[in-house]
Each structure stands twice: as C-alpha cells, then as structure tokens.
Image: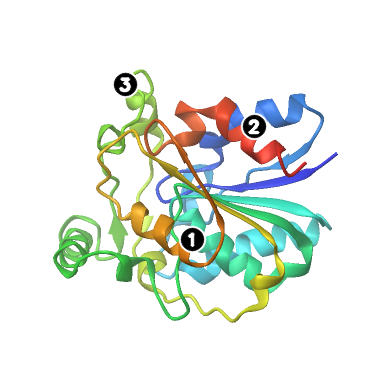
Amino acid sequence: MATFVLVHGAWHGSWCWKRVRRILQAAGHEVFTPTLTGLGERSHLNAPSVNLSIHVSDVVNLIQWEELSNVVLCGHSYGGCVISGVAEQLNDSIRALVYADGFVLEDGESFMDLFPPEQVEQARLQAQTIGDGWKFFPFPSSLLGTNPKDVPWVDAQFTPQPIASFEEPLRLTDKASSIKDVVHLLATGYESPLPVAVAHERAKSKGWTVRTIPGGHEIMLDRPDELASLLLEFA
C-alpha cells in the first residue's frame, strides 16, 4: 500500500481531488487531500496573514501528525510551490514529487515573481479595490480549459486566495535533491493564462522527468484516470 498526499492549487480545496482520490483508494492506497488554510471548507479561516509558509505548514503538519513516510506528494498549480516547501522540510519522508501543471519556484522567489510586472500590478489592484485589500479572486475556470460540464461546479466551488500566499518568497536549499523521483506534468490542451510552461522548462533543466497530458489545467478533474495512473507508477 502506498501513501499519497495530494495538494490543491489556488482557489481550490480538497474537493478537486475527489475523482483521483476514489481511483487511488479503490486500488487499496492511503490518500490524503488536505485543504489549505483559508480555502474551500476552511474558507472561514481566510485572513490577510495567510501566506505560503502557513500553507506549507498545513501539509508538513499533516505528514508529521499522521506519521506518514514514503509519501508520494503531488501538487497542482500553486500547490507546486507548496510541495517544494514541504520537500525542503521533510525530504526524508517523501518517496516522489509530482508537479501536476504545477509551478516550480527557485530559492527566494514568490509565486508573483513568475508573472509579468503588469499582471502582478493588476492582481494587487484587484485585491485593493474589490478584495478588501488582501483577497485575490479566481479566474473563470473556462479560461483554464476546464471541461465545459464542470465549469459551473468549479466556479461555484472556487474561493478567493489570500494574496500574501502569492507574495511570500520561498526559501530553499538543496535538501530536496535527495528525492530522486520528481515529475513535472504539463497540460497541453489549453491556452494557459498562467506561466506553467516556464515551470516545465525549469523541470527539464533540473533533470526531472517531464511528461505532457492533453486537456486543461484542471488535470485532476478532466483527466483523473491518466493522473492516477501516473501517480500509481510510484506505488
């Protein structure tokens, strides 16, 4: 039996993993899908102070308190930033890292640093004008290439993201280099408003395994069987 920890991206929650979770559990594996502080069913905890460090701690604490080892850790989108932070702290507990259309930060970078300055300025302006100074509202999921049947549901499930989580730099050393199985999976079936292709190139430069998958950004919803199959390679 393998242990999977699946980390959602910005605006999402545990709900987005339900299709993949069912497949992995049906195969007899242990699956954890934590919701990050301030999002999904934990949106009542959203606050200006919620940053990347808190989201990393959400997952670190789960792994420690559940006494997990040999974890296959997967992060979708912004969740890629989170799992990099987790791997920095708990490299000895992690069997493999999977970035599912996920972002890859370098030491000292924030999520915002991946975007052009004009987009960063627009995000901060949105937070100031309609987000009480600290909330960043989601894109319509249709812009992410989401399966049209799922768009109304996904849009209804989305919750605003605390902008501090996008602005805080991630501090990394080379501790995670001890994790030998690292995969970046790029979704190729949509015109991405997100710089995920940059992460894919970074993954190549690091010598990670790189894969592509047709479909939109919401891989775990649009292609749950294919994503589960990739994860099961590490079971």
How many other residues sit within 10 Å of disc 1, few (<14), some (14-19) or many (≥20)? Answer: many
First along the sequence among labels 2 and 3: 3
Placement of the N terminus among the 4 image quadrants: top right
| Tag 2 residue | 229
* Viewer-closest of 29 and 101: 101
Task: Name the mark nearer the viewer: 1 or 2.
Answer: 1
Q: In the picture shown, does residue 29 fall above or below 101? A: above
Label 3 crowd (10 A; few <14 / some 14-19 / many >=20) = few
Amino acid type indicated by mark 2: Ser
Measured as percent of width and height from the top left, residue 91 is found at: 72, 68
Residue at left offset 48%, top offset 60%: 203
| Front one among 181 and 123 | 181
Q: Is residue 26 left or right of residue 226?
A: right
Which is closer to the viewer, label 2 or label 3?
A: 2
Distance in Å between CA atoms under marks 1 and 3:
30 Å
Is residue 30 found left or right of 102 in the rendered image? right
Q: Amino acid at mark 3?
A: Pro
Tell me if label 2 and label 3 are in contact, CB under 8 Å: no
Question: Which quadrant holds the C terminus?
Answer: top right
40, 225: nearer the viewer:
225
* Marker disc for residue 148: 3
**Residue at horizontal 43 percent and vertical 81 percent from the top:** 108
| Residue at which label 1 appears | 203
Q: Earlier in the sequence, mark 1 or mark 2?
A: 1
Badge 1 amino acid: Ala
Please tell me which residue is depicted at 31% across the width and 33% down the height of the picture. Answer: 145
Q: Is residue 126 left or right of residue 14?
A: left
Residue 33 sits in quarter: top right
Residue at (35, 59) in percent of width and height: 198
